[in-house]
């Protein structure tokens, strides 16, 4: 039997943990590559894994060395009704040189990818040409801020040359956000 102090500490830990945990579920909707097949041939698709989960599966054949001669930028857009009428959202990752991203920002996201892909680890840059796989990756709500509104989201990821605004490679990832237990 737990002492009253231990029980109180356990309840406090559980309540603090629930504050920081995401209060929503997320699920992949679709993936689109719009250009850049000469840099990377991306064959990823979203498929239903079961009745309540969709996964990202496939591979990315990187054909060029990804280093600081390239920049990555990620923008977010949000459709509250899920009808593809998107509004830009202020959450984004500003254009950053690839190696600077892999060595710094990537450390916040890599843990969500490491069990389902062979994407580069933090600090593994430049990234040499290679085939990367995604093996039934499930989107984790804890990857996102805890205040994400419900609806359809679009992440637009662009790879550019420094100083150039036209993306050499551009792809979009769509996902749904809903209350816990809706999917």
Image (tube, rainbow, N blue to C red):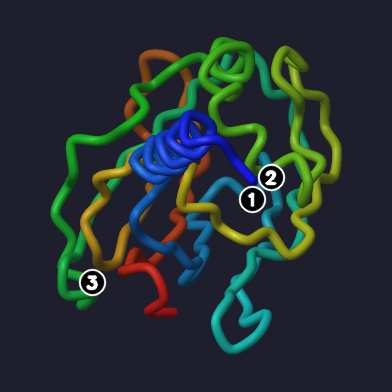
Please say if the residues under marks 3 and 1 sit with CB atoms less than 8 Å apart: no
Which residue is located at x 58 percent, y 89 percent?
51
Crowd band around label 2 with a 10 angstrom C-alpha radius: few (<14), some (14–19), many (20+): some
Judging by the rendered image, the residue that carries numbered circle 2 is: 40
For residue 21, side relative to residue 40 (left or right): left
For residue 39, side relative to residue 28 (left or right): right
**Quarter of the rendering containing residue 121:** top right
Seen from this angle, which residue lies furthest right? 130
Crowd band around label 1 with a 10 angstrom C-alpha radius: few (<14), some (14–19), many (20+): some
Q: CA distance from mark 3 to mark 1?
A: 25 Å
User: Helix, strand, or loop for circle 2?
Assistant: strand
Please say if the residues under marks 1 and 2 sit with CB atoms less than 8 Å apart: yes
The numbered dot on residue 84 is: 3
For residue 53, side relative to residue 179 (left or right): right
Residue 1, percent across and down? 64, 46
Q: CA distance from mark 2 to mark 3?
A: 27 Å
Q: Is residue 87 above or below residue 30?
A: above
| Foreground: disc 3 or disc 1 | 3
| Foreground: disc 2 or disc 3 | 3
Quarter occupied by the C terminus: bottom left
Residue 154, percent across and down? 34, 56
Which residue is located at x 14 percent, y 54 percent?
87
Which residue is located at x 63 percent, y 78 percent?
47
């Amino acid at each position: 039997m737990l002492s009253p102090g231990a029980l109180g500490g356990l309840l406090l830990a559980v309540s603090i943990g629930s504050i920081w945990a995401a209060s929503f579920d997320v699920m992949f909707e679709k993936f689109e590559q719009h250009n850049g097949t000469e840099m990377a041939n991306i064959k990823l698709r979203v498929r239903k894994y079961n009745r309540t989960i969709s996964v990202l599966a496939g591979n990315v054949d990187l054909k060029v060395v990804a280093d600081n001669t390239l920049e990555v930028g990620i923008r977010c857009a949000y459709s509250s009704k899920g009808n593809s009428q998107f509004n830009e959202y202020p959450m984004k990752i500003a254009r950053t040189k690839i190696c600077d991203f892999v060595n710094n920002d990537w450390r916040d996201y890599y843990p969500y990818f490491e069990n389902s892909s062979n994407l580069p680890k933090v600090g593994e840059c430049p990234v040499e040409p290679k085939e990367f796989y995604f093996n039934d990756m499930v989107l984790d709500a804890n990857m996102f801020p805890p205040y994400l509104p419900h609806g359809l989201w679009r992440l637009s990821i662009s790879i550019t040359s420094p100083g150039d605004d036209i993306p050499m490679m551009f792809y979009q990832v769509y996902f749904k956000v809903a209350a816990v237990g809706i999917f």
